[in-house]
């Protein structure tokens, strides 16, 4: 259906205008109403998407800035649709997490529109516009409505890291444009298959700029230091969006930009990139183990889980002998892990927010014996924790299993080291569960209410989704199998 993607992008922007003009008491209801409309639009996109067809679908292409060859060009493939669905799930979840001021709802809707645009844009100018459009709301949401004494520094750090990475990407793409005369992703990827996009040393500089910008966004070790501060200071709903969807822009950029445009550079740097991916898995898991602040603990584990995605991608791109079945397994695992991490990490931040709302603190030693007072809250939170550590039967297992299955067949030693991340994650969560849920009931927790009706309305559907994906994930595989098959032909 013509124009469906544009409608999806515009609806949150229109919603932001309505929220800005509404009474403060009606702001959340209006934001949720527009999210319902975007959900209906996303469902129509899914319904009209043909999973058996290769390449981009439902394309909308119009001249925009003819003098530089920039077009308004949006379309979706399986990966784009998966991320559109993930965005559609996470934002209502975040809006319901905790009541916020009217301005915060408006900025969240602007960020939602930017994410839809980023995941569907098919040329760099448009992609970069939406990429930067998501940066400003994130900065303002942390700086104005964040908590803690360090929120100003956390917001500034978030902005500086991401903005400097964006500048590096912009300069790199300008160099590519002057060499090839195009911003179109598909055209540049086709050119990169036969020859470097730019000649000589400039090719490595262009690669470094794009790599830096995307590595900051994921984030990849050692460019991850902004993330724990930003997630810790952000309001609960904003932390859910940052980890659930915004971090996926970096992984998406690796799949859509870096791997197709710089295959030779990635293969040449293969051992180093795999080493960074392993560090992103193991070190943040150890850091999470050492945290006493629950929000920082979940933030570090978010880096750890996104490291699995990069392990799968770098393994595929850097090895020379690449059986198609292992590539398909690793890619399917990466795509599924993107979705699963978004759902599970957002749920964990939601539960931490519930604990903080009840206690006024979120230190791991501020609680104790909660199972005696709030069995429902502890039970549902345990499901999210078990999902994050990869328990079979829940959504976290299948993605990680496929990544390791594919990666073990391609690069055994780095993958074996990365398995330590699973061990440290399990220890971290089991320790947290013991301190929070077991033992004598803390005096400060004796008046805690269990899950309220409005909280069950949020928790139950998301938890059921974890079980649905863990038990019968085929409905998600059907979305991106075509994209996986197409990418496999490029790498095999």
Image (cartoon, rainbow, N blue to C red):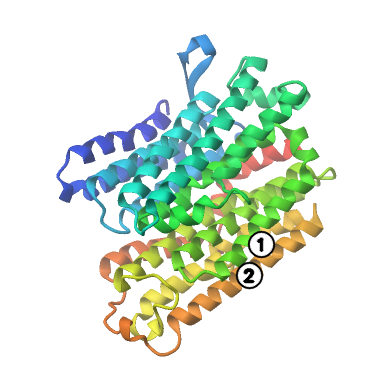
Mark seen at residue 282: 1
Is residue 24 left or right of 294 when viewed as pictured? left
Q: Residue furthest top?
A: 67
Label 2, label 1: how many angstroms apart (C-alpha)? 8 Å
Q: Residue furthest bottom?
A: 440
Which structural element holds mark 2?
Answer: helix
Q: Is residue 168 above or below residue 310?
A: above
**Residue name at image x 43 percent, y 45 percent:** 156
**Residue name at image x 57 percent, y 51 percent:** 224
Please say whether residue 330 is visible from this viewpoint. no
- Find residue 302 and report its image quarter: bottom right
Which of the two discs, 2 and 1, labels the residue nearer the N terminus? Answer: 1
- Find residue 267 and report its image quarter: top right
Is residue 165 left or right of 24 when viewed as pictured? right
Q: Which residue is mark 2?
A: 424
Image quadrant containing the N terminus: top left
| Residue 150 in picture, x, y percent from top left | 40, 55
Q: Is residue 31 above or below residue 64?
A: below
Q: Residues within 10 Å of mark 1 (few under 14, many from 20)?
A: many
| Residue 86 in picture, x, y percent from top left | 46, 48
Query: Between 171 and 325, which is closer to the camera in this rendering?
Result: 171
Number of dots carrying numbers: 2
Mark seen at residue 217: none
| Residue 205 in picture, x, y percent from top left | 69, 29
Q: Residue furthest right?
A: 321
Please say whether residue 457 is visible from this viewpoint. yes
Image quadrant containing the C terminus: top right
Verify CB contact (< 8 Å) between mark 2 and mark 1: yes
């Amino acid at each position: 259906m013509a124009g469906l993607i544009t409608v999806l992008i515009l609806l949150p922007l229109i919603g932001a205008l309505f929220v800005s003009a509404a009474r403060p008491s009606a702001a959340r209801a209006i934001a949720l109403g527009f999210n319902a409309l975007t959900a209906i639009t996303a469902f129509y996109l899914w319904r009209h998407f043909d999973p058996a067809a290769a390449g981009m679908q439902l394309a909308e292409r119009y001249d925009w800035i003819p003098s530089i060859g920039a077009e308004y060009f949006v379309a979706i493939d399986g990966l784009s649709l998966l991320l559109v669905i993930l965005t559609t799930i996470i934002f209502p979840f975040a809006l319901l997490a905790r009541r916020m001021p009217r301005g915060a709802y408006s900025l969240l809707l602007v960020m939602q529109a930017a994410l839809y645009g980023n995941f569907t844009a098919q040329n760099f100018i448009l992609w970069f516009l939406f990429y930067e459009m998501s940066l400003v709301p994130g900065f303002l949401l942390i700086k104005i409505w964040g908590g803690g004494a360090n929120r100003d520094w956390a917001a500034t750090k978030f902005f500086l890291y991401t903005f400097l990475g964006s500048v590096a990407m912009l300069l790199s793409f300008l160099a590519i444009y002057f060499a090839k005369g195009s911003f179109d992703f598909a055209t540049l990827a086709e050119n990169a298959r036969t020859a470097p996009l730019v000649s000589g040393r400039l090719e490595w500089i262009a690669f470094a700029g794009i790599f830096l910008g995307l590595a900051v966004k994921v984030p990849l070790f050692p460019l991850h230091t902004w993330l724990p501060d930003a997630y810790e200071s952000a309001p609960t709903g904003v932390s859910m969006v940052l980890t659930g969807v915004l971090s996926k822009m970096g992984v998406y950029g690796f799949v859509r930009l870096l791997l197709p445009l710089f295959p030779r550079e990635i293969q040449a740097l293969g051992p180093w990139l795999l080493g960074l991916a392993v560090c992103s898995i193991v070190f943040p898991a150890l850091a999470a183990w050492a945290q006493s602040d629950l929000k920082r603990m979940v933030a570090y584990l978010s880096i750890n889980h996104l490291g699995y995605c990069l392990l799968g991608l770098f393994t595929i791109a850097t090895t020379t002998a690449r059986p198609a079945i292992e590539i398909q397994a690793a890619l399917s695992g990466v795509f599924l892990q993107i979705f699963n991490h978004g759902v599970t990490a957002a749920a964990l931040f939601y539960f931490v927010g519930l604990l903080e709302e009840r206690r006024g603190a979120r230190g791991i030693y501020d609680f104790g014996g909660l199972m005696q007072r709030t069995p429902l809250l502890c039970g549902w939170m345990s499901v999210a924790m078990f999902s994050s550590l990869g328990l079979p039967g829940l959504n976290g297992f299948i993605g990680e299993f496929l990544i390791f299955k594919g990666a073990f067949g391609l690069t055994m030693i780095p993958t074996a080291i990365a398995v330590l991340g699973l061990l440290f994650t399990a220890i971290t969560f089991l320790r947290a569960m013991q301190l929070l849920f077991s033992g004598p009931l803390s005096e400060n927790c004796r008046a805690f209410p269990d899950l309220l009706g409005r909280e069950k309305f949020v928790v139950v559907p998301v938890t059921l989704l974890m079980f649905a994906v863990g038990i019968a994930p085929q409905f998600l595989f059907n979305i991106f199998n075509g994209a996986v098959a197409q990418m496999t032909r490029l790498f095999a």
